[in-house]
Image (tube, rainbow, N blue to C red):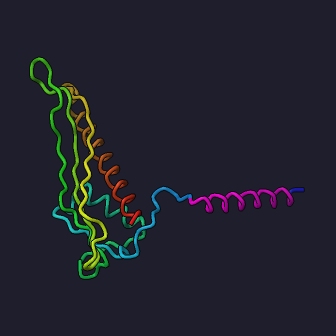
Amino acid sequence: MFESRKTWIVAVLLLLAVTVGACGFQVRGTSNLPAKMERTYILADDNHSGFYQRLRDELRQADIEVVDSPADATSIFSILHDVTSQRVVAVSARNVPREYEVYYIVSYTITSGQDTLMDERTQTQTRAYTWDETKVLGKIQEEQLLRDAIVDDLVRVVMMQISTL
């Protein structure tokens, strides 16, 4: 009886795997990137920005070789604009900032030889947070967490756009 139950469980798991695979399901994080991006060079003014670092990591996770020289690349991902900052959104009656907005703006294009795989695109993400001068360290950490979340969202959007090429 134990052997027949074991066989039945294996059959159900196999059927489930085939069904999930047939419906087009993909594990989050995997993507179908163009073959022309097999070896990609990332051209950027700031190789230490959050967007650059996270994009590089995400491309590597998608089995794209990120190369150190444009001569070795099959495509070039050019980061044309990579800016993050914050601005005051609301102030108190005493003209003290009460709410800030963190924003991140990136512009990019992708080329492969003489071909343009993706025309210039610009993505902007913002997040707001309240300011309390009695909790400065916590608010500074909150700002950094928001900035990191914005970068994750931007990279996710870019990777989805690339997978449609």
Report whether 121 appears left or right of 12.
left
> Within the magenta stretch, is there residue 15?
yes
Residue at the image position 26 percent from the left and 60 percent from the top: 52
Question: Can you give x and y, in whole percent of width and height, for residue 20 in the image?
Answer: 63, 58
Report whether 162 appears left or right of 21.
left
Q: Closer to the camera, 46 or 165? A: 165
Up-down: is 156 above or below 33?
Answer: above
Report whether 76 appears left or right of 26.
left
Residue at the image position 9 percent from the left and 18 percent from the top: 94
> Within the magenta stretch, is there residue 99?
no
Question: Can you give x and y, in whole percent of width and height, for residue 101 in the image?
Answer: 21, 36
Q: Give the overall secondary structure of the magenta segment.
A: helix
Residue at the image position 29 percent from the left and 41 percent from the top: 146
Question: Can you give x and y, in whole percent of width and height, for residue 43 in the image?
Answer: 21, 68
Q: Which residues are magenta?
A: 3-24
* Quadrant including the C terminus: bottom left
Residue at the image position 30 percent from the left and 42 percent from the top: 145
* Quadrant including the N terminus: bottom right
Q: Single out the residue that lies furthest toward the bottom.
A: 71
